[in-house]
Structures are given as C-alpha cells and as structure tokens.
Image (spheres, helix red, strand yellow):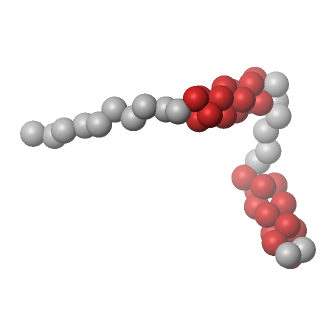
C-alpha cells in the first residue's frame, strides 16, 4: 500500500509559478546553453 502526501504550496511559491508562466507567455525565456554561459561569466567575476 502506497501512501502519498499532498504538497500544499505557500503563497510566495504560487506567486513565483504565476510569474514564471507570464514570462513564458511573453517570451521572456533563455536557453539552457545561454544560461550556462551566463553562470560561468558570473562565477568568473566572483
């Protein structure tokens, strides 16, 4: 018998998900490759 828990999102998590959906809808996205490049640039500045 498998027992599952239902996760209850907190309001700030729901807000972040809603913002993410809006970003996707409006094309405010970045490829994983570009994100990796930005991360490397950021890390090299630390």
Q: Nearer the viewer, residue 29 or 46?
A: 46
Q: Is residue 17 visible?
A: no
In this picture, residue 36 sits left or right of residue 14:
right
Q: Is residue 34 left or right of residue 2?
A: right
From the viewer's perspective, tell me whether residue 9 is left or right of residue 31: left
Query: Residue at coordinates 65% horizontally, 29% vertically from top-left?
Result: 15
Camera sees residue 21 = yes
* Residue 20 image offset from top left, x and y in percent: 70, 32
- Which residue corresponds to the image point at 72% horizontal and 52% vertical from the top-left? 32
Position of the N terminus, as image quadrant, is top left
Q: Quadrant of residue 4?
A: top left
Q: Is the residue 32 above or below the residue 29 in the image? A: below
Residue 38 drawn above or below residue 44: above
Q: Position of residue 42 (x, y in %)?
A: 85, 67
The C terminus, quarter of image: bottom right
Count of labels in the image: 0
Question: On screen, 23 above or below 37?
Answer: above
Residue 8 position, x and y percent, is: 43, 31
Q: Residue pushed farthest front?
A: 11
Residue 24 or residue 6, whichever sits in front: 6
Nearer to us in this view, 28 or 15: 15
Where 13 falls versus 26 (above or below)?
Answer: below
């Amino acid at each position: 018998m498998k027992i599952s828990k239902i996760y209850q999102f907190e309001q700030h998590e729901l807000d972040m998900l809603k913002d993410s959906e809006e970003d996707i809808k409006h094309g405010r996205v970045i490829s994983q490759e570009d994100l990796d490049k930005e991360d490397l640039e950021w890390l090299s500045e630390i």
